[in-house]
Amino acid sequence: MTAIGKLLVANRGEIALRVFRACRELGIATVAVAAPDDRGSLHARSADASVEIGSYLFSEEHIRAAKHTGADAIHPGYGFLAENADFARAVDAAGLLWVGPPPEALDAAGDKLESKRIAREAGVPVVEAGEPDELGFPLILKAAAGGGGRGMRVVRSADELADALDAARREARAAFGYDAVFAERYLERPRHVEIQLLADEHGNVVSLGERECSVQRRHQKVLEEAPSPALDDDLRRRMSEAAVAFARAIGYRSAGTAEFMLDGRDFWFLELNGRIQVEHPVTELVTGVDLVREQLRIAQGEPLSASDGPFLGHAVEVRLYAEDPRTFLPQAGRIERLRLPAGIRVDAGVAQGDEIALAYDPLIAKLIAHGSTRPEALERLAHALDETEVAGVVTNLPFLRWLVSHPTLRAGRTTTAFLVEHPPLSEPPPRAAATPWHGSFRLNLPGPAPQPPPDVDAAVHDHAAATEQRALTSPMPGTVIRVSVAPGDRVAARQTLVVLEAMKMETPLVSPYEAVVRAVHVSEGDRVAGGALLVELEE
């Protein structure tokens, strides 16, 4: 066994602070890294030592910083290089301890098509993938090396396919440095349920139960809870066995999460995330297991100390973001006031006075409430959200308050289509309407008609149509990556005029009506502020 004396976290924000906290409890010294535009951030101020690096995406910069400070181990956090097998190999080649899965397991899990093949051979059900003309529509495009919603597009007709492929590839290349994408059958209304795994080098693999993550925006999670209100003991056992079987098949080690889609009692494996998850605190609260501490113990060669057991009550987490509460478009600015609640767990990544920058994920904090029952946990979270205050930057706090009080969520009946059927901040349905028949009577009812995913540009359309100058303005700070029109062009309603990129996610901005382009005020590569004038239209 190799003891860790000093650890560098190759990440930033909330997850870096979370790992630092575990290290302090274990007596391990910590090293932060910070990009030039992130030097004053909270994580850089919180470690025992801090080193400036050129970019969070440059593996050699992290290794250089570790060597410079005398660190003997690197924890990748999540995002950036966390699931990069080449980074894991480089850390090992440099004589440093890698706190994560073996590179071979990351290769197998990171290639989504290869992981599907391995899952099938292990007897784990998977969603059908193939060529678009074989699958039919709707289908979903996914980045082969993806995660976090990057490089993902739902396609509902053949005429949408070419533009969706281009956008998915651009996002994948920007986020992962690899632009391969694949098509998969799209399920309209599944639940999203994931199984938390731990595995050590001694052959022990354990499931710590599930998390329900069905409430999502732009294919990214908004609220997570454990246990799932959709699972009973038998279904939990079957899904856990499938997750463990896949982990064994790829020789997994460390903490990881097997993600599944669930429809009734049928489930399909999506992918294995070879890292700690953003939502790991809900599992920690209902199991009593410190997952980051387990990661560190496993990396040092120690056997698992955690085991599968009954859940200790219920936990719910929401993510407080700097983003528009209706469109979920990211926002930037300085946090002039930040009041986070007492009485629940809060994992924050920023402090009052800090800047939310355009280049990084806009997560402010995770709020996690625990109770002996699900209603108690939700009620505690609702009170905590009422206590929360943020000034200086637009946040999704009004949306979170609306979400946690929503009768459909309270009834435990959310799916990945929740925000299609209940647009953000819309009037909740009458309580009676939110609790339809369950059980066999419900099985005899026809399913709801398919609807498209949430239109994140809806507010942009409304705004553009309402402005006296008939101007299309930027709904967020971002970079212009495509200008599709020129002055004098006639455009159709909902035709894409400009594509913005922020946080490695693309947002197409469309014409609110049939019009003629009067003027274009931006060029590709321009960085624009929220509210900046982009295109003027005339009828």
Image: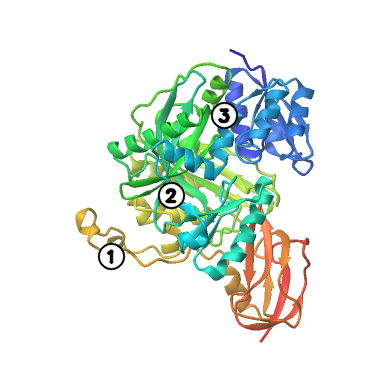
x, y percentage for residue 107?
59, 36
At label 1, the amino acid type is Pro
Q: Which label was assigned to residue 154?
A: none
Kind of element beneath mark 1 = loop
Seen from the viewer's position, the closer of residues 529 and 174 is 174
Label 2 and label 1: CA atoms lie apart by 23 Å
At label 3, the amino acid type is Pro
- Confirm whether residue 97 shows in the render: yes
- Give above or below for 407 relative to 256: below
Mark 2 or mark 3, earlier in chain = 3
Figure quadrant of the N terminus: top right
Label 2 packing within 10 angstroms: few (<14), some (14-19), many (20+): some
Q: What residue lies at 71% left-to-right and 71% top-to-bottom?
A: 484
Mark 2 or mark 1, earlier in chain = 2
Label 3 packing within 10 angstroms: few (<14), some (14-19), many (20+): many
Label 1 packing within 10 angstroms: few (<14), some (14-19), many (20+): few
x, y percentage for residue 109?
54, 38
Seen from the viewer's position, the closer of residues 35 and 72 is 72
Kind of element beneath mark 2 = loop
Figure quadrant of the C terminus: bottom right
Residue 101 lies left or right of residue 57; in this view the side is left
Residue named by callout 2:
127
- Give above or below for 319 relative to 530: above
At label 2, the amino acid type is Val
x, y percentage for residue 348?
59, 39
Residue named by callout 1:
446
